[in-house]
Amino acid sequence: MAEQIGAKPSGVKRIIFKQIVYGDFRKFLANSNDAKSGGGARDLRFRPHSTFASVFGELFPESRTEERRRVGRQVLVEVRVGKFHWSDHGIIVSAEATFEPPTSAREEEGRIPTVHKYSPFNRIVSTWPEESWDVDKRALKQEGRLVLLLVQRDDGSVWPEFATESSLRSENWSESVANPIIKSLTGRRNASEVARGFIDFESGKAYLDGV
Amino acid sequence: MASEFSEDTLSILSLLRDRHNVLLSGPPGTGKSRLLNEVASAFAPSAPTGPVHVPGAPVAIPRTPPISGQLQGVIPSADRSNRKVFRTVFHQNTKYRDFVTGLVPVVGTNAGGGGTTFRIVAGTLFKASEHAKQSGGASLLIIDEINRGPAVQIFGGSIVAIESDKRLAQDGNTRTYTQYFEITSLGSGDLVEYALPHHLYILAAMNQADTSVEPLDVAFLRRWSPFRLAPSSAILRKYMGLSPQTASALPANPSSAIDVYEAAARAWASVNEKIRLGRGPEFQIGHGVLMVRETAAASVDEALRDVAESWSLVRGHVDEVFFGDLRGVAAVLNVGNFDGHPYSLKDTTFADEPRLELTGPASVKTAGIYSLLRAVAGQ
């Protein structure tokens, strides 16, 4: 749906960020159906859910109840509902976005399902093709790690954006955004984990994984 | 974020960009102070309190927020991010040292609290100039009431150097026509040569019609691009919620706030028309005198109260402009041309000499203001 909401620069209320690895691109293109990327997963996961749930509640303020299958049974779960916004050739576009509670298989991971539906996720794949990535496909050869930012503006709208580590370090980005993300990127964690967190400029709260 | 700027603001920014020095003039109440503030906020927007998201930009949350779309193409030194506004107000005691550099006494410098020494101070022009010479620096110097002090003496040797083509080049180097003048060095106290930078802009404001102002000479004035504000009936009528212009007769008694405002707008226009003819356009009184609150009043009583308060200012202005000329005051107030006018002009004598006397209420309260406005408007 094309709209004109938030076409101008606007203040930022909060940001959720997550490091993206090449394996995530398969989800962004909806061709991820192998075990390596989590079976048929096309969702982007955030853990621990207990930490991210409240901030996703701010990004996606509505909720609705939906049926899901859990351990072979139909159950009702509460899904947070909002919108993603992005600019498409100068026109502001938005589409419904949701945040779902953990599945029984991954009890501490909340998730944004079907990310392939949103253009910003498709476009980033063509921006950084496979040959741009280093050997283990966790960082770009030249630009370092890639980060997804879910930016909530003063008008409440949520915009997916991407930033490379070298761009964040280049002094072009707002320090209040770049510095915490870089701290998390350089934090200590297991090799299989990625940097993630949130910065809430309204409440002053933040979660920086690895810091 | 900067949002909407008036046409006047954009015009002044454009003039500053091209000519560097702009002199804003206009009668009192025409919005000079508001305009100075608007230009200042456009030139150096307040730093946002938090990060700013720019949709579609390569850096989604940049360190330096972009210039508002309205200001693109008109803002001076658009590529400079270290922007600052300096302000000063000239008065009868403003001196060269307050504006450029100079010596000021420092008393009580010895252990006993006595003794006097001197120190060299940086004036407002010097500070603005030094800021504009920094990497990425740009300065807007606002001088309010420029003709309230001895402007030519205050500018001293910088008077020629302020001219647009007498400045340093954009990169800070000397150009063929760069004009140097001598100042007292802050460090050594010696006289040193000094020139003004390209990225320094000066916006001055003055009211030509006040009684305590100093005349500005032609050589001074030609170094400025003039920008004149005039009383605007359109702005006033829009504020009051009146139709652009109407010829219908005013009712004998107001039934709405609109009736009160219509009478006030017509009386104000009539007063200004007569001041313009009697003393000159620069002596008129601006629309701001009747715009006393954020939005016009909705009830008759509130409107009468606002208009009565404003009228005392209008009347004070008329008395000042026509001081010693009672016949002029009476003509502006339309005395003698309206049946039932609250004022009358009488011939009388003092020590056997003929005199004039303007009789009527010393001040007009809410109860009498509407009939007075009708009388002044002649309707």
Image (cartoon, coloured by chain):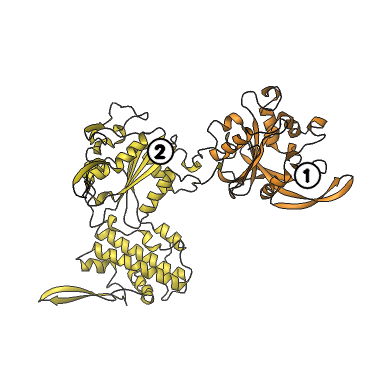
Residue pictured at 23% horizontal, 32% vertical: B192
Residue A189 placed where, x, y %? 68, 33
Tell me the element at label 1.
loop
- Above-or-below relation of B328 to B53: below
Q: Quadrant of the C terminus of chain B?
A: bottom left
Find disc 1 in the rendering and name its residue: A102
Q: Could you say which is closer to the camera, residue B121 or residue A115?
A: B121
Q: Which chain is orange?
A: A
Residue A170 placed where, x, y %? 54, 30
- Above-or-below relation of B212 to A162: below
Name, please, the residue furthest toward the front. Answer: B111
Find disc 2 in the rendering and name its residue: B76
Residue pictured at 25% horizontal, 69% vertical: B330
Q: Amino acid at mark 1?
A: Pro
Q: Does residue A145 appear to the left or right of B89 in the view shown?
A: right
**Location of residue B82 (image quadrant):** top left
**Location of residue A28 (image quadrant):** top right
Q: Could you say which is closer to the camera, residue A122 or residue A202?
A: A202
Q: Could you say which is closer to the camera, residue B76 or residue B99?
A: B99
